[in-house]
Amino acid sequence: MRDAFAKHPDAKGMLLITPTDYGACAAIRETARVCHDHDVPLIVDEAWGAHFPFHPALPSWAMDAGAAICVTSVHKMGCGLEQGSVFHLRGERVDPQVLASRADRLGTTSPSALIFAGLDGWRRQMVQHGEELLGRALDLAASVRAELAAVPGIRVLERDDLVGPRLADDHDPLKIVLDLQELDRSGYDASEWLREHHRIDMGLSDHRRMAAQITIADDEETTGRLLTAIRDLVDRIDEIRPAKPVDLPEPGELELEQAILPRDAFFGPIEDVPPEEAIGRVAAETISPYPPGVPAVAPGEVITRAVVDYLLSGLDAGMYLPDPADPQLKTFRVVKR
Ligand SMILES: Cc1ncc(COP(=O)(O)O)c(C=O)c1O
């Protein structure tokens, strides 16, 4: 990270996404310290961490770890209505009036009283009963983890898999990630099967995993349904096709070269070209496998063979791409030469 600041001395701040959809948390405090050494603010996308402030056994939330701003979606791990996202501001590094004026440019002029009331209700409930409710959810998650780990073929990702040197800094135990590699099935197909046969929507799925998230709204009845469904899935595994291989790039291969500014690529002249011709061209669109919704390609970046192979093999395996002009990627939208 210090190298990134050395390379980009004019950086105005840093945006850190933590926790991930898999519940892995970055070292916010250390990151904030490096940002402050360079006198810039740290902004944290803490979409999945709405509950963190309200129980001591959960990872630290960004405001306690030195970030200037964090944005969180109360409708994710909290109990807000959809669109109930909020930002928090702390310290002197970001002027509240500047932040308010930026928010004003992006926000609606017709705020929803329902959403605001939902947010306030959640905040009040957490302040009054958060520790007790989240403590119960944590106990429930621990017992669900143990029961799922006993299901043959299912591997539950535990703290030791995610946290350690060169791994994550912390972990949210309410995110229960199931690895299906031993069953040779993809998370995409297994999640579809659970939806069809048990009316259960998993939180996240990828080429080999799927995740369940436990919240304060869960109890033995809801987790019992999950356990029954996962056991049934394993018993009826032959109903699901074997996992199709996905050409996963090395992490570095997903850091594409930024050739021009995103806005110039997005608003400039464009054309749609077949995948083979897209290699080496500058993307004019965002392509984000969802979930987790992190862009593999952003406007202005040079498209590589590794990323094309990843996305095409991913689509074949069941990956969902909500944002490109052609979600099946018969064509890629690129900047016109
Ligand atoms: C890391 C991250 N940030 C932001 C968002 C979007 O949040 P919102 O639903 O509040 O718009 C998501 C949605 O999944 C996310 O995973």
Image (cartoon, grey):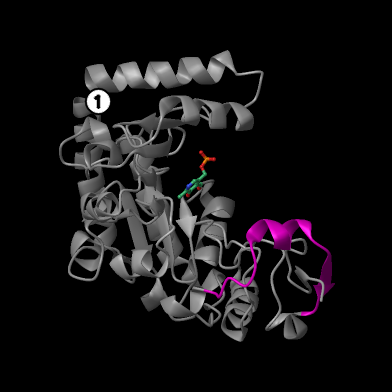
Residue drawn at (21%, 42%), measured in percent from left and top? 58
272 part of magenta stretch:
yes
Question: How far across and how far down the image is residue 20, in percent?
Answer: 38, 54
Q: Quadrant of residue 102?
A: top right
The location of residue 320, given as percent across then percent down, is: 62, 62
Q: Nearer the viewer, residue 120 or 87?
A: 87
Q: In the image shown, does 285 or 21 lie closer to the viewer?
A: 285
To which quarter of the image does residue 4 belong? bottom left
As drawn, 153 above or below 105:
below
Corner quadrant of residue 89: top left
Choose between 60 and 178: the one closer to the eye.
Answer: 60
Label 1 crowd bin: few (<14), some (14–19), many (20+), radius 10 Å: some
Question: Is 107 displayed left or right of 41 in the figure?
Answer: right
Q: Is residue 221 above or below residue 24?
A: above
Image check: 271 left or right of 300? Answer: right
Question: What residue is disc 1 on?
Answer: 130
Q: Residue at x 42, y 65 (%)?
A: 8
Residue 172 visible in the snapshot: no
Q: Which residues are magenta?
A: 256-274
Q: Secondary structure at mark 1?
A: helix
Which kind of residue does numbered mark 1 sit on? Gly
- As drawn, the residue found furthest toward the left would be 56
Can residue 330 be seen here?
A: yes
Q: Tell me the residue at 79%/79% (across/down).
A: 274
Q: Give the position of the C terminus as an image quadrant.
A: bottom right
